[in-house]
Image: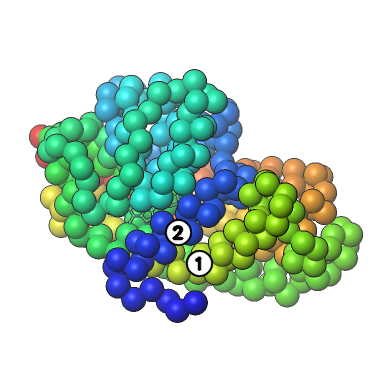
Amino acid sequence: MEAPRTDEDIRDVNTRYHDVAADGYDAKWGIDFGEPGRRQVLMKLRKVVGGADLERGWKRSLEIGSGTGYFSLNLLQAGMIERATCTDISPGMLATLRGNAERLGLEVETVETGAEVLPFADASFDLVLGHAILHHIPDLPKAFAEFHRVLRPGGTVVFAGEPSRYGDRIARVPKRGAAAVAPLWRRAIGARAAGSVPYANGNGNGNGAGHDAHAEDHALERFVDIHAFAPGDLAAAARSAGFVDVTVRGEELVANWFGWTNRVLESSAVPEDVPWGWRQYAYRGYLALQQLDRRLLEGRLPAAIFYNLLVSGRKAA
Ligand SMILES: C[S@@+](CC[C@H](N)C(=O)[O-])C[C@H]1O[C@@H](n2cnc3c(N)ncnc32)[C@H](O)[C@@H]1O
């Protein structure tokens, strides 16, 4: 498949990839709507949003690229927002989000839209937020101008989980190392190589369509991420749109190396062959290293070297 050339092609690839990925998305990325998920989301917000805002919470929120609802559904459950509007360019992701909301007994409004043209009146929301979305958007200045327009004066904008350019480069080292030792690792845990058996759990229908979906997912995935940022890029995008009190922070360094190593190893094996004990070790190890990053490294080292960036700002009152 050819790489997408125009902004429209990039949006189209993003829509198709995320539609295919929607079914297995939460399992693939370990998205959780219980206590651990809420803790993760709140921890990220606390890194860039002032304590007073967090104590008050927000009445109306708008999430951009909300996917299956990781941020909005967890914030609703935590009582941080009263009414959530979730937007996404992928109808498949929004359908999964509605299923998640129903299961959790939560009410949300979902609206299918790209980030650069938002179908909402000026000053409609108290909070505009997103997680792992800015790096997919072709026209960032246009999108930031929209975030500013739909936010009420004094409102908060916050985006987390954006890939950092240098952090991403540094993370290639553990990724390559893991790919090199993957065959040995599989032998040690007794797992078969991914792709060595017909794909059985792709879309859960067990009739072979899962294989097609999995193959398409792989073919499109490498085209959906179009930016990696230096901290100054995100600050400049927010300030150019008119936001004030702009803050950018970096998060996850050692946890990220550990997480990517395990993700590369695990993705090299048939999922059913990866032992439960290994998954527990990977999950708990990641959480422990996340705390180490937060307590020891994030306040001391430059934001640029961390894997994820967070940006927040305010619309002048
Ligand atoms: C990496 S996923 C993150 C989903 C969710 N925020 C999360 O953290 O789990 C990116 C999401 O952005 C959506 N997306 C991609 N391009 C978009 C665009 N131009 N406008 C709005 N949403 C977009 C995708 O469909 C997908 O649901």
* Image coords of residue 36 (percent x, y): 58, 33
Circle 2: element type: helix
Q: Earlier in the sequence, mark 2 or mark 1?
A: 2
* Residue in view at x 29 percent, y 58 percent: 234
Crowdedness near tag 1: few (<14), some (14–19) or many (≥20) residues, C-alpha within 10 Å: some
Q: Residue furthest bottom?
A: 2
From the image, tell me which residue sits under label 2. Answer: 16
**Image-quadrant location for residue 273:** bottom right
From the image, tell me which residue sits under label 1. Answer: 220
Foreground label between 2 and 1: 2
* Image coords of residue 255 (percent x, y): 59, 53
Circle 1: element type: helix
Residue 70, which numbered label? none
* Image coords of residue 165 (percent x, y): 41, 67
Front-lying residue, 25 or 19: 19
Instruction: Check the image and report above or below for 225 versus 66.
Output: below
* Image coords of residue 6 (percent x, y): 30, 72
Marks 2,1: beta carbons within 8 A: yes
Disc 1 marks which amino acid? Leu
Crowdedness near tag 2: few (<14), some (14–19) or many (≥20) residues, C-alpha within 10 Å: many
* Residue in view at x 69 percent, y 42 percent: 284
Instruction: Please say which color scheme the image uses.
Output: rainbow
* Residue in view at x 36 percent, y 51 percent: 89
Front-lying residue, 203 or 288: 203
Instruction: Check the image and report above or below for 81 versus 3.
Output: above
Front-lying residue, 303 or 106: 106
Disc 2 marks which amino acid? Arg
